Image (cartoon, rainbow, N blue to C red):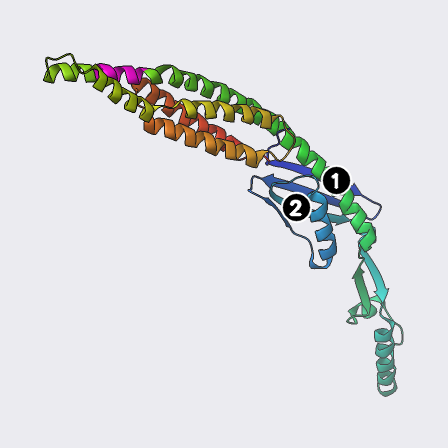
Amino acid sequence: MVRSMTGFGRGVTTTDDFQLTVEIRSVNHRFLEIHSKFPKEWLEIELMAKKQLSQFVSRGKLDINIHVKTEEQSSFNVQINWPVIEAYKEVKEQLSSKMPLNDNWSMQEILSIEHAIVFEKNEIPLEQLKIAIQNAINEAAEQLVQMREREGKQLKIFLLQYKDELLEQIQLIRKYSPQAVEKYRNKLIERMKEITSSNDFEDRILAEVALFAERVDISEELDRLESHFQQFVDTLNEGTSIGRKLDFLMQECLREINTIGSKNQSAECSVAVVKSKTLLEKMREQVQNIE
């Protein structure tokens, strides 16, 4: 199964008191790196969330965002600060004994007393919060994986197309590479005829051609390339976490192509080598986004 490393997932948990939303975004990365923005008091939950998410993906840079929306009627708890009001009452009674004051209390007067009415924000119980986050992360992670798998299918199609085009260039290289030896032999014969009238140079030419043929021989490189291509196809059909293996195979293919290019003595092969390098770079660019 080919999976891309880019994706997005969103999960929502709704209760009577609050609605919790988890959003996960991922991009390609050499390893698994999870960034989250949790409140400091949620440290235990944050560690739990990262461990939970690591069970769904093995590579990529992931960002987790959490948003909690509480119901207005349950967001705050209003408390009367009786000690403050009692202290204010005693002071007022003392003042009343010295000067005429209205004994009646108005709501405006009470509300004007600092800290007489306390508004406390209701905290979500930790266990309830844990369950809500677990459910939301499961939903978001499943969406993320589905999106990564959809993109992975497209990547596989592109890679197989590039592989077929690359094989065509390799076949051209295999076809034209022997011609370089024959051209070299003909050039040697022409040069020998120019400097001597004797025809007794065949053995020397054969020796020179044999050395040249050994120096420019690329049959082993071509065989290894075809072997790498077969491993590449087999790997695409394996399970998840195949990105690093594919990237290694791309590096090996590029190394073989560079070796072929350095040994090449044919104009036709040079064109095929350049096209092969271009295709390999395109493949490697796609492979680096595979989990």
Tell me if residue 149 is in the magenta stretch: no
Above or below, 263 relative to 103: above
Q: Is residue 59 left or right of residue 77?
A: left
Q: Secondary structure at mark 1?
A: helix
Give the overall secondary structure of the magenta segment.
helix
Residue 204 position in % (x across, y down): 21, 19
Relative depth, front residue between 239 and 50: 239
Relative depth, front residue between 26 and 117: 26
Residue 27 position in % (x across, y down): 57, 39
Relative depth, front residue between 204 and 26: 204
Neighbor class of circle 1 (other Cα within 10 Å; few <14, some 14-19, many 20+) is: many
Neighbor class of circle 2 (other Cα within 10 Å; few <14, some 14-19, many 20+) is: many
Tell me if residue 185 is in the magenta stretch: yes
Residue 150 position in % (x across, y down): 63, 27
Q: How much space separates mark 2 and mark 1, taking CA atoms?
A: 12 Å
Any part of residue 71 in sight: no
The structure residue drawn at horizontal position 37% and vertical position 20%, both measured from the top left corner, is 272
Q: Residue furthest right?
A: 103
Quadrant location, the N terminus: top right
Q: Residue furthest bottom?
A: 98
The structure residue drawn at horizontal position 47% and vertical position 34%, both measured from the top left corner, is 251
Name the residue beneath numbered marker 1: 138
Residue flagged by tag 1: what amino acid is it? Asn
Any part of residue 245 in sight: yes
Name the residue beneath numbered marker 2: 64
Q: Is residue 157 left or right of residue 73?
A: left
Instruction: Evaluate if marks 2 and 1 touch, with contact meaning CB atoms under 8 Å apart.
Output: no
Q: Which residues are magenta?
A: 179-187
Q: Secondary structure at mark 2?
A: strand
